[in-house]
Amino acid sequence: MVARQDLTTDPGLQEQLLQARRGTAFFARKLNELSDAELDGGSLLPGWTRRHVVAHVGYNARAIARLVDWASTGVETPMYPSVAVRDEEINFGATLSPIALRNLFDHSAVHLSVEWRDLPDDAWHHTVRTIQGREVPASETVWMRTREVWVHAVDLDNGASFADIPAAVLERLLADITSAWAARGSDAGLLIKVSGTDRTFGDPDAAVVVAGPLAGVVQWATGRGTDGVTAGAGPVPAAPKWI
């Protein structure tokens, strides 16, 4: 039997879907390396165990699948009724048995992939709304998921690092983060330089220049460490709030 293929014929979108699925596979690998007992251990996110991270990533797939269904049917199906409901769901998911938690991740990831696969070209342009209230085309759901699986694979604190994340994902992530800072004006006095390139972000007249390799700069920008990052002769400042 021939495997069914994505309905979209857009090469750019096909490449983005591949990156999201690779990120899902990477998260799955780091999750499968953990024993059931290790799921109780801490993650890189304050106040969250690895269980919370897995629950969040699982329920996130379900939430994004609801947006894809919205684009497909035209029937509004929000990601979550509210942020509070999302948080309650994550806390509940963290209490599931190890096998149920692993199944949540596996089944939700497959469901989302199938929803993407069966969405025709014209529906990818239909507008949906994120939990933050942004109205975006359905194609944005692919990037929403891509950054979740790659970054949270690192958050499992099981040996993954930002150096494992593809450069294309890191570049878009850094652009997203610095754009959010600029929109809020929180990057005033701060310039970010990516080593080995001429790319800079932020205030060109900044007194503080944070520099480092792409992976290190993105790790810092997401608030997850300062490996390989410098700020002149002084200490590396905390990154402005991202989300």
Image (tube, helix red, strand yellow):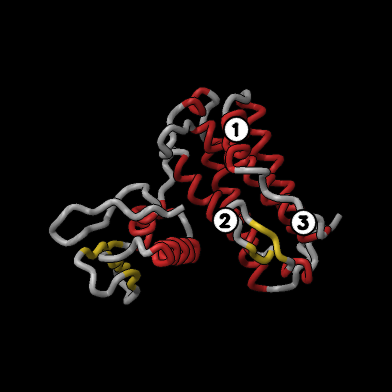
Residue 228 found in image quarter: bottom left
Query: For the residues marked 3 and 1, what is the alpha-carbon distance in whole angstroms?
Result: 23 Å
Name which residue type carries label 1. Glu
Residue 82 found in image quarter: top right
Is any part of residue 18 visible from this angle?
A: no
Q: Is residue 227 left or right of residue 131?
A: left
- Label 2 secondary element: helix
Who's the residue at 48% across and 50% down the image?
A: 151
Who's the residue at 81% across and 60% down the image?
A: 74
Give the camera-side residue of 194 and 47.
47
Residue 94 location (% of width, % of height):
57, 29
Residue 213 location (% of width, % of height):
32, 62
Is any part of residue 79 visible from this angle?
A: yes
Residue under label 1:
88
Residue under label 2:
146
Closer to the camera: disc 1 or disc 2?
1
Name which residue type carries label 3. Trp
Query: For the residues marked 1 and 2, what is the alpha-carbon distance in whole angstroms?
Result: 23 Å
What label sits on residue 70 in the rendered view?
A: 3
Name which residue type carries label 2. Thr
Give the camera-side residue of 14 and 75.
75
